[in-house]
Image (spheres, grey):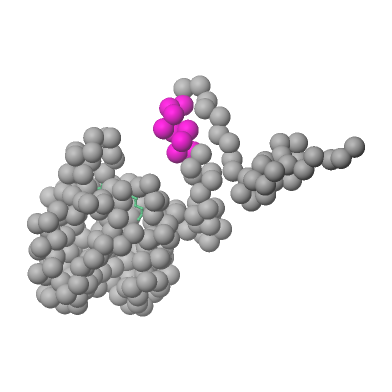
Amino acid sequence: MTKKTPPKNFANKSSKKRTTREKSEHVKSAKGRKTSSTKWLKRQLNDPYVAKAQMDGYRGRAAYKLLEIDEKLNLLEPDMLVVDLGCAPGGWCQVAANKGCQVIGLDILEVDPLPGVTFLEMDFNDEDAPDKLIAAMDGQKADIVLSDMAPNTIGHKNTDHLRIMMLVELAYDFAKDVLKPEGTFLAKTRQGGTSNDILTMMKKDFKTVKHVKPPSSRKESAETFVIAQGFRG
Ligand SMILES: C[S@@+](CC[C@H](N)C(=O)[O-])C[C@H]1O[C@@H](n2cnc3c(N)ncnc32)[C@H](O)[C@@H]1O
């Protein structure tokens, strides 16, 4: 009797060996768990960057976004002062601190301590947030202001867009106050998102302004990053 071979790309269910491609985790929808949470869990379990972050000792997959942007644009150098807005759980802080930067991170959420990093637990929308950050900078100007702040989305495209843009604008105003000449501003925004007004302002205040979407930023996500370099001071 001739043995039937399965066609190419056909997952042989009886086979105990699974190839890497087939090795995706299946997540059953538990009673009471929302479909969106099930999808999130499935995505987390099957995301190579999540596994890599665990192996590399990073606090989250977000770390790779800054690593990849830095690899491309060489932003981080030892002894730079970096302000990281929306820093929890601390992946970007780890990347900058590993490069020898002095880091000040701020988030609404509490962040576990990291060597070389000062954390402020507060809402960046609070009136006194800029002053608290400036006090932590101890009379120095910043080389880089990062913002990965992301408000919780509510699923209403225009509202979500406006909420992230408000944070980008707030972070930008702060950056202009604290950056050294030639400094850099990097902020998360949404595709088709950075308003013309703020882009026009950035192009006046910085030598170069562009958008980058690092490979670790999920293709299906509208997130992208605006980067302004060469602050005119
Ligand atoms: C995508 S996470 C940042 C991940 C971080 N870059 C990392 O590598 O670990 C976005 C963060 O922005 C914070 N955030 C959102 N709105 C904020 C606000 N108004 N003030 C401070 N933090 C805020 C959230 O609490 C969340 O921790």
Residue 91: x and y, percent? Answer: 41, 58
Q: Is residue 24 left or right of residue 212?
A: right
Residue 222: x and y, percent? Answer: 31, 48
- Residue at left offset 20%, top offset 68%: 209
- Quick check: is 34 in the magenta stretch? yes
- Residue at left offset 33%, top offset 55%: 87
- The residue lying toward the viewer, choosing from 72 and 109, is 72
- Residue at left offset 15%, top offset 71%: 206
Residue 177: x and y, percent? Answer: 12, 66
Q: Is 157 drawn above or below residue 127 in the view shown?
A: above
Q: Is 126 drawn above or below residue 102 in the view shown?
A: above
Magenta stretch, main secondary structure, is helix
Q: In this view, does 204 lie to the left or right of 13?
A: left
The quarter of the displayed image where residue 40 is located: top left
- Quick check: is 100 in the magenta stretch? no
The quarter of the displayed image where residue 146 is located: bottom left
Q: Farthest residue to the right: give it.
A: 1
Q: In this view, does 1 lie to the left or right of 161?
A: right
| Magenta range | 33-41
- Residue at left offset 67%, top offset 41%: 11
Whether residue 184 is visible, yes or no, is: yes
Whether residue 124 is visible, yes or no, is: no
Residue 136: x and y, percent? Answer: 23, 64
The quarter of the displayed image where residue 176 is located: bottom left
